[in-house]
Amino acid sequence: MLKIAIDVMGADNGIAPIVQGVVRALKNRDFIAVIIGDEAQITPLIPTHLRQKVEIVHCADYIRMEESAASATKRTQSSIFKAIELLQNDAVSAVVSPGHSGASMSLATLKIGRIKGVLRPAICTTMPTTSDKPSMILDAGANTDCKPEYLVDFAIMGYEYAKHVVGLENPRVGLLSNGEEDNKGNELTKASFKMLKHFDFFKGNVEGRDIFNGSVDVIVCDGFSGNLVLKASEGVASAINSVLKKEIKSCLCSMFGALFLRGVFRKLKQKMDHSEYGGAPLLGVQKVVIISHGSSNARAIECAIYQALLAIESDICAKLAHTFANKAPIQE
């Protein structure tokens, strides 16, 4: 049975919602959860009937959000170090962590290693769209400063992930820019466009609005821009939710109307809620690592575990290794 390591230390809301997410996933899928964290806090949260499917690796130390990611390499007793070490030694098949994302990325790159041919790993995050399928942005924060060659790698990895994990037959890839015209963008996007235009899956420049309208499936950008888009979209979704609640409560007519539209609001919440998308895979490393939001609730962790299982079952790391081993030289 597959084993998934879950680092439960360092999340914004403590251990409880992370363990609750693990429990919910265990009720729906067959796997062994290897939970890394404070055993005294974890044990009471595991139902008796599920304890045979749980292994606890006691650990009190963790990388705080305000600490440098570089410190993770020296903190051998920290929860993320132990989780990545288990993955490195094949004791587990994937790692899920809502802790310090920089520490997770640094340790995964250092101890697990990049897939040969990949210049930089990238965070691939999922975004809601008006279509039935979500879109994906990469990089969403792993690489703030990029070269055009990195964005080409991101495009290839995003295409393969969309095809083999998400299940899209012919994923469409766009380059995030400030206009759809071929000559738009900064120096990075202009140079990246010249390289990407040789790929059949490339559909050209896209604007920020195209992330949500389903016109492309994968949006490529540098990690600085991708992280700004991610945080801004989360803020907009939260603001819309707050405004709707406020307006519905403002008058009796609105409350009655909301009763008739409960199903619509439920679907809207589900589509807009980042918890439904779980975590973001770190693509480009040799094994499955899922980076979850620090504020993840139980549902987000549950979905992140499903995402890890799907990535393992689709053998995405091996598929990426094969793709990059056979990658043609980049044309300019």
Image (tube, rainbow, N blue to C red):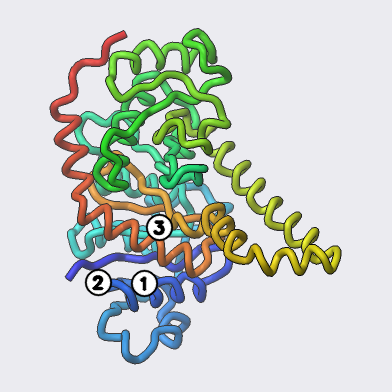
Separation of residues labelled 1 and 2 (CA atoms) = 9 Å
Callout 3: SS: loop
Q: Is residue 26 left or right of residue 61?
A: left
Q: Quadrant of residue 157?
A: top left
Where 112 falls versus 157 (above or below)? below
Residue position for label 3: 75
Question: What residue is pinned by disc 1?
Answer: 25
Tell me which corner region of the image, top left, top right, bottom left or bottom right, holds residue 323.
top left
At a point 82% along the width and 65% down the height, the residue shown is: 253
**Residue at the spot of label 2:** 31
Q: Which residue is depicted at the point 49% across and 24% down?
A: 206
Q: Please give left or right for residue 223 compared with residue 163 in the image.
A: right
Closer to viewer: mark 2 or mark 3: 2
Contact? badges 1 and 2 (CB < 8 Å): yes
Lateral position of residue 137 relative to residue 261, left or right: left
Q: Position of residue 287 (x, y in %)?
A: 24, 50
In depth, the one of 248 and 238 nearer the eye is 248
| Disc 1: CA contacts within 10 A as few (<14), some (14-19) or many (>=20) | many
